[in-house]
């Protein structure tokens, strides 16, 4: 059930009903007991897995730390806190966004309208409302968690703010090991999307976070999905290269009449995507378009209520 990665690090894997089919939670030992990093979704298996894990540990779970507010990482936080009696710790910005998105019943309609404003047809934009109702029972974040900020320490690990995949994404670092959340994944490329009321340049944030990771030079990264990364620096370089290539491809897609982010996403990601996958593609396309705008390579304007992009000049 628990996988020992070191004397004081354990991994617990929780199944997910959607891709990639699992999420890894980590347990970190210090003098107080164990810290659970992330909480999965509120799926039926969560209670059994946490109970089984607790029976294998030599001390209680005394705190829960959340890397970021995406459903598969924060959705089980309330349940995990109730089962363990441990307080939840979460980044200040991350919790603000968590409450805005998962605590706001009007958010699905708001973001559906936002996708329509970026050219998404009704079937793509409106399915987000249906999915919001479908996933709501599985997302139970903890209200008013204890705040985490850059420079704090959790269980003897340093808290790092490494935004990009999520605006308030946190990682934990000790020695040469990084508990990475979804900051570094392999072979998956972490999604970096631009969303309403979020940071204005998420791709720029992510590129800077990757550069910081390279300078930090960890020898092992423990990701939220997939196997441990034994060369995190090489993976960070590969992700930088990927996004530079994607920026160039996005520039090439602007060779013609102004077009919406939805239309650009058809060239970058192909036309054969389900509505849910298309929304991720549109958001990621927008993050690249905004980065290009800040680099002076693209510009945008609104026509008939739809934002359209063109090559600068």
Image: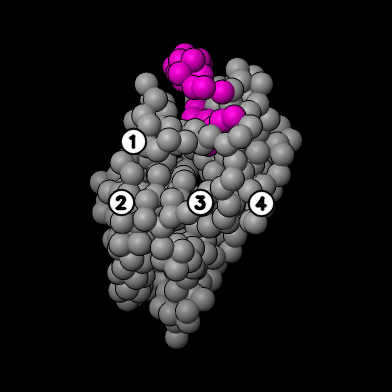
Q: Is residue 313 magenta?
A: no
Nearest to the eye among marks 4 and 1: give it. Answer: 4
Q: CA distance from mark 4 to mark 1?
A: 31 Å
Tell me whether circle 4 and circle 1 mark residues in contact (CB < 8 Å): no
Q: CA distance from mark 3 to mark 2?
A: 15 Å
First reached walking from the N terminus: tag 4 or tag 1: 1
First reached walking from the N terminus: tag 1 or tag 3: 1
First reached walking from the N terminus: tag 4 or tag 3: 4
Q: Position of residue 272 (x, y in %)?
A: 25, 46
First reached walking from the N terminus: tag 2 or tag 1: 1
Above or below: residue 289 compared with residue 266 = below
First reached walking from the N terminus: tag 4 or tag 2: 4
Tell me whether circle 3 and circle 2 mark residues in contact (CB < 8 Å): no
Q: Which mark is residue 152?
A: 4
Is residue 55 rendered to the left or right of residue 188? Answer: right
- The C terminus appears in which quarter of the rendering? bottom left
Residue occupying image coordinates x 45% and y 50%: 178
Q: CA distance from mark 4 to mark 2?
A: 26 Å
Residue occupying image coordinates x 58% and y 64%: 200
The magenta segment: 33-59
Q: CA distance from mark 1 to mark 3?
A: 27 Å
């Amino acid at each position: 059930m628990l996988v020992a990665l070191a004397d004081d690090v354990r991994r617990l894997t929780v199944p997910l009903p959607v891709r990639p089919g699992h999420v890894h939670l980590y347990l970190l030992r210090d003098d107080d007991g164990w810290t659970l990093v992330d909480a999965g979704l509120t799926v039926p298996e969560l209670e059994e897995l946490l109970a089984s894990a607790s029976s294998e540990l030599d001390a209680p779970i005394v705190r829960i730390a959340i890397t970021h507010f995406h459903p598969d990482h924060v959705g089980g936080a309330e349940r995990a806190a109730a089962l363990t009696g441990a307080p939840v710790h979460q980044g200040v910005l991350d919790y603000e966004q968590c409450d805005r998105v998962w605590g706001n019943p009007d958010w699905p309609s708001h973001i559906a309208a936002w996708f329509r404003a970026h050219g998404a047809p009704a079937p793509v934009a409106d399915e987000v409302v249906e999915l919001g109702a479908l996933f709501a029972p599985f997302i139970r974040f903890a209200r008013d968690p204890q705040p985490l900020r850059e420079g704090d320490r959790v269980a003897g690990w340093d808290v790092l703010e490494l935004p990009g995949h999520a605006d308030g994404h946190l990682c934990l670092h000790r020695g040469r090991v990084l508990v990475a959340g979804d900051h570094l994944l392999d072979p998956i490329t972490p999604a970096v999307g631009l969303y309403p009321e979020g940071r204005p340049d998420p791709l720029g944030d992510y590129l800077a976070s990757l550069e910081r990771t390279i300078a930090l030079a960890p020898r092992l990264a423990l990701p939220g999905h997939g196997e441990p990364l034994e060369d995190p620096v090489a993976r960070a370089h590969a992700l930088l290269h990927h996004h530079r290539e994607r920026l160039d491809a996005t520039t090439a897609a602007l060779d013609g009449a102004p077009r919406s982010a939805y239309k650009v996403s058809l060239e970058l990601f192909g036309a054969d995507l389900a509505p849910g996958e298309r929304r991720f593609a549109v958001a990621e396309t927008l993050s690249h378009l905004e980065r290009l705008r800040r680099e002076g390579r693209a510009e945008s304007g609104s026509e008939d209520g739809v934002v359209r992009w063109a090559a600068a000049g």
